[in-house]
Amino acid sequence: MVASRGRGGGRNNRGGRGGRSGCPQCTYCKRMGHTQENCYSLHGFPVKVAQVAQTEKSESKFSDTEYQEYLKLKSEKSSSQTSSSSVPCYSTTCISQSIDSPSSWILDSGASDHISGNKSSFTSISFPKIPHLVTVANGSKVAAQGSGQVSLSSSLKLDSVLFLPQCPYNLISLS
């Protein structure tokens, strides 16, 4: 019995130089999978263009550098707290309706309590004999001057809000 080994013969012939059945071979570079019309060796690679969406940037009371420093401190605090596997990991989410207003509130998943530095935002406030200590982003402890209720709207009230006069932001705890 004689085996045919030329083009088109033999059962192991795949049509060309070791290519895949049904795949075209480029006549320019001799590679499989494309034709000369689509050859990158001949025509070059297409230019890659990224589509970047433009969004409006809202103005805030603090600079980008201050905000980045705040996030860094929050990250360091979370990292030091998560050294044990039983300690939960916290992430930070900040949302505000209007940064320009002293009555705007920031949702903070890393805050353990609701906090306000604006005494006029409280509808009622009490001044306990034993102050509540709050650990801030840089790791130091600050004593709350009071605790009370804040009305964000006629239907939304926050109880047990701590008053920290030195706090430049109003925080709503999500934890």
Image (cartoon, grey):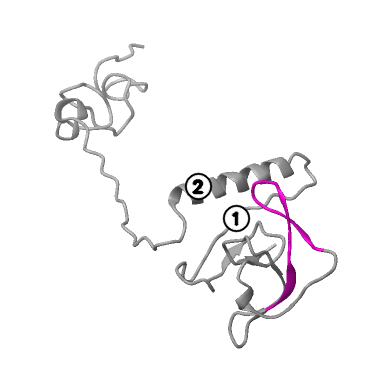
| Residue at point 47%, 56% (across, down) | 62
x and y, in percent, of residue 4 in the image: 29, 15
Evaluate if marks 2 and 1 touch, with contact meaning CB atoms under 8 Å apart: no
Q: Return the x and y of residue 29 as percentages of the image width and height.
A: 20, 21
- Cα separation, mark 2 vs mark 1, equals 12 Å
- Crowding near the residue tagged with mark 2, few <14, some 14–19, many ≥20 C-alpha atoms within 10 Å: few
Q: In the image as oriented, which residue stretches furthest toward the right?
A: 130
Relative placement, left or right, of 121 versus 44 is right
Vertical relation: 160 (above or below) 43: below
Image x and y of residue 49, in percent? 26, 43
Q: Residue at x 59, y 80 (%)?
A: 152
Q: What residue span does the magenta drawing correspond to?
A: 131-149
**Horizontal relation, residue 128 to residue 112: left or right:** right
Q: For this rendering, which residue is in front, 14 or 61?
A: 61
Mark 1 is surrounded, within 10 Å at the Cα level, by few (under 14), some (14 to 19) or many (20 or more) other residues, namely some
> In terms of image quadrants, where is residue 151?
bottom right
- In the rendered structure, the answer to whether residue 165 lies left or right of residue 6 reads right
Marks 2 and 1: which is nearer the front?
Answer: 2
Helix, strand or loop under label 1: loop
Q: Secondary structure at mark 2?
A: helix
Q: Nearer the viewer, residue 167 or 34?
A: 167
Picture quadrant where residue 106 is located: bottom right
Hey, what amino acid is under mark 1?
Answer: Thr
Q: Which residue is mark 1?
A: 92
Disc 2: which residue: 68
